[in-house]
Image: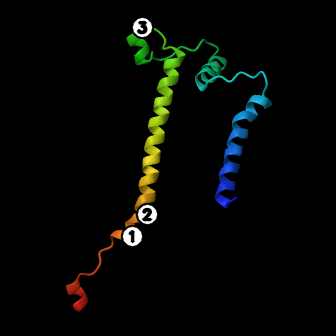
């Protein structure tokens, strides 16, 4: 097994352990979002119920709260676009480094004679 294969397998194992460890270490814990945690903290500090400053635009358009599946879809689309931009950027940088040195101008025949 090559060194790169070992690194990839170890990295995949580490990712799986990091993803599953909280589920087993914190049995029965609630995994809420940051919005929920923030509103709870605001209520603790101020002693009043948290009231949002505004309503999301899509909720105003459809006249109610977005279904969880639609929110997940939008989140996945946003994640995919972000990953695409990052992958393009990293690929561009690697290609520029790899192929950038090949475009150096070679001296013309006339310059060689001088």
| Picture disc at residue 63 | 3
Q: Residues within 10 Å of mark 1 (few under 14, many from 20)?
A: few
| Picture disc at residue 97 | 2
| Picture disc at residue 40 | none
Question: Would you say 114 lies left or right of 9 here?
Answer: left
Q: How far apart are the two marked residues, 1 and 3, measured between alpha carbons?
A: 57 Å
Q: How far apart are the two marked residues, 2 and 3, measured between alpha carbons?
A: 51 Å
Element type where label 1 sits in the image: helix
Q: Residue at 60% across / 12% down in the picture?
A: 49
Q: Quadrant of residue 44?
A: top right
Instruction: Name the front one of labels 1 and 3.
Output: 1
Instruction: Name the front one of labels 2 and 3.
Output: 2
Element type where label 2 sits in the image: helix
Q: Nearer the viewer, residue 39 or 45?
A: 39
- Where residue 37 appears, as percent x and y from the top left, is 64, 23
Q: How far apart are the two marked residues, 2 and 1, measured between alpha carbons?
A: 7 Å
Q: Nearer the viewer, residue 88 or 38?
A: 88
Which quadrant of the figure contains the C terminus?
bottom left
Q: Are marks 2 and 1 in contact (CB under 8 Å)?
A: no
- Where residue 16 appears, as percent x and y from the top left, is 70, 39
Question: Would you say 113 lies left or right of 39 here?
Answer: left
Which quadrant of the figure contains the N terminus?
bottom right
Q: Nearer the viewer, residue 97 or 46?
A: 97
First along the sequence among labels 1 and 3? 3
First along the sequence among labels 2 and 3? 3
Q: Residue at 40% across / 17% down in the picture?
A: 57
Q: Residues within 10 Å of mark 2 (few under 14, many from 20)?
A: few
Q: Residue at 39% across / 70% down in the picture?
A: 101
- Where residue 41 appears, as percent x and y from the top left, is 64, 22
Q: Residue at 78% across / 30% down in the picture?
A: 24
- In the rendered image, which residue does mark 1 sit on? 101
């Amino acid at each position: 097994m090559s060194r790169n294969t070992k690194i990839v397998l170890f990295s995949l194992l580490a990712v799986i352990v990091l993803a599953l460890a909280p589920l087993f270490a914190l049995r029965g814990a609630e995994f809420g979002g940051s919005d929920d945690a923030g509103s709870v903290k605001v209520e603790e500090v101020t002693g009043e119920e948290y009231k949002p400053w505004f309503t999301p635009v899509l909720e105003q358009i459809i006249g109610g709260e977005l279904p969880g599946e639609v929110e997940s879809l939008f989140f996945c689309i946003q994640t995919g676009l972000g990953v695409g931009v990052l992958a393009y950027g990293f690929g561009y940088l690697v290609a520029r480094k790899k192929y950038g040195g090949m475009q150096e101008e070679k001296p013309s025949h006339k310059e060689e004679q001088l």
